[in-house]
Amino acid sequence: NRRRTSASVKRIAEKHLGELEQRIADMQSMRNTLAHLVHCCHGDARPDCPILDDLSKV
């Protein structure tokens, strides 16, 4: 919309930027949790699995 002021466009862009930054932070947190769980899992024939244990809490 060419009728919007530069300030209005900047506010919209800042809002989108903030939302993206929050989504990135959330995904990094999920990645760190999953990486920790993968590290803790033996990946063998045992029935106990920290990954499944953690997911069952959700």
Image (tube, grey):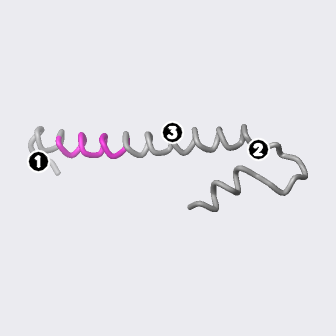
Q: Secondary structure at mark 3?
A: helix
Q: How far apart in space, not on screen, are marks 3 and 2 (Cα)?
A: 20 Å
Whichever of labels 1 and 3 marks the residue nearer the N terminus, that label is 1
Label number found at residue 4:
1
Helix or strand or loop: what does disc 1 sit on? loop
Contact between marks 1 and 3 (CB within 8 A): the answer is no
Mark 1 or mark 2, earlier in chain: 1
Looking at the image, which residue is at 21% across and 46% down?
12
- Amino acid type for the residue under numbered disc 2: Cys
Please provide percent x and percent y for residue 2. 14, 47
Q: Position of residue 17 (x, y in %)?
A: 31, 40
Q: Nearer the viewer, mark 3 or mark 2?
A: 2
Magenta stretch: dominant secondary structure: helix
Q: Position of residue 25 (x, y in %)?
A: 43, 40
Q: Quadrant of the C terminus?
A: bottom right
Numbered disc in front, either 1 or 2: 2
The one of 56 and 7 positioned closer to us in this rendering: 56
Q: Along the horizontal axis of the image, is 14 left or right of 3?
A: right
Residues shaded magenta: 11-20
Q: Amino acid at mark 1?
A: Arg
Q: Position of residue 46 (x, y in %)?
A: 87, 52
What residue sits 76% from the left and 44% below the top?
Answer: 41
Q: Residue furthest right?
A: 45
Would residue 12 be found to the left or right of residue 28 on screen? left
Q: Distance between the Cα atoms at labels 1 and 2?
A: 54 Å
Instruction: Tell whether position 29 is magenta.
Output: no
Residue beneath label 3, please? 28
- In the drawing, what numbered circle is on residue 41? 2
Disc 1 versus disc 3: nearer the observer: 3
Q: Tell me: 3 left or right of 47.
A: left
